[in-house]
Image: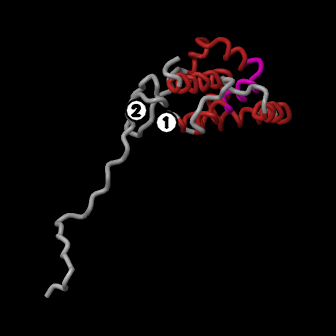
Amino acid sequence: MEKPGFTPQPSYGQQPMGNPGMVMQPGGIRNALGKPYDKDGKRDWSHGLCDCFAECGTCCQACWCPCIVYGKNRTRLNALQQGHRHPQGGEGCGTDCMVFWLLHCFTGIGGCVLQIMNRGDVRERYAISGNGCSDCFSVWCCMPCTMTQQAREIEEEEKALNGGL
């Protein structure tokens, strides 16, 4: 016997199904060049490691003053993580630069460790394939090349935020 005001719920023959996961599509501001994603949702860098000479100014600066390029890349990435571009295109002589310089001068490898960590942050943000070992190997082989590659990856998102300008 049913109670007054009670409406029986229909019975279903199936368990509820989960929603399909998010599928990353080529394009968007974090993949402005539309690089294809692999089955794990990862993609390649927008520019190769040895393409650093296409951006000669950054590459030369990374050779002679890596702390400045590190500082710019770090502050540009931090600004993008907050949803906007860095107004001055990165802060070359700020706290990040100083920490890099001090660690590199006093330990000899501290700057490399910071660069490896920053490279991992960039890879994570842009869903780029690789791991800590590949980051370490790339930085040890050619730190200026990795800094330039990261600067160019960050620049692609900045251009996309600015409508391609």
Within 10 Å of disc 2 (Cα), the crowding (few <14, some 14-19, many 20+) is: some
Within 10 Å of disc 1 (Cα), the crowding (few <14, some 14-19, many 20+) is: some
- Residue 47: x, y in percent? 52, 20
Q: Is residue 103 left or right of residue 77?
A: right
The magenta stretch spans residue 72? yes
| Dots 1, 2 in contact, CB < 8 A | yes
Amino acid at pointer 1: Ala
Query: In terms of depth relative to the viewer, which is nearer, 132 or 41?
Result: 41
In this picture, which residue range is highlighted in magenta?
63-75
| Outermost right residue | 106
Q: Which mark is residue 50?
A: none
Query: In terms of depth relative to the viewer, which is nearer, 70 or 88?
Result: 88
Q: Which mark is residue 37?
A: 2
Give the SS element for disc 1: loop
Residue shown at the point (57%, 17%) measured from the top left: 50
Quarter holding residue 123: top right
Residue matched to label 1: 127
Amino acid at pointer 2: Tyr
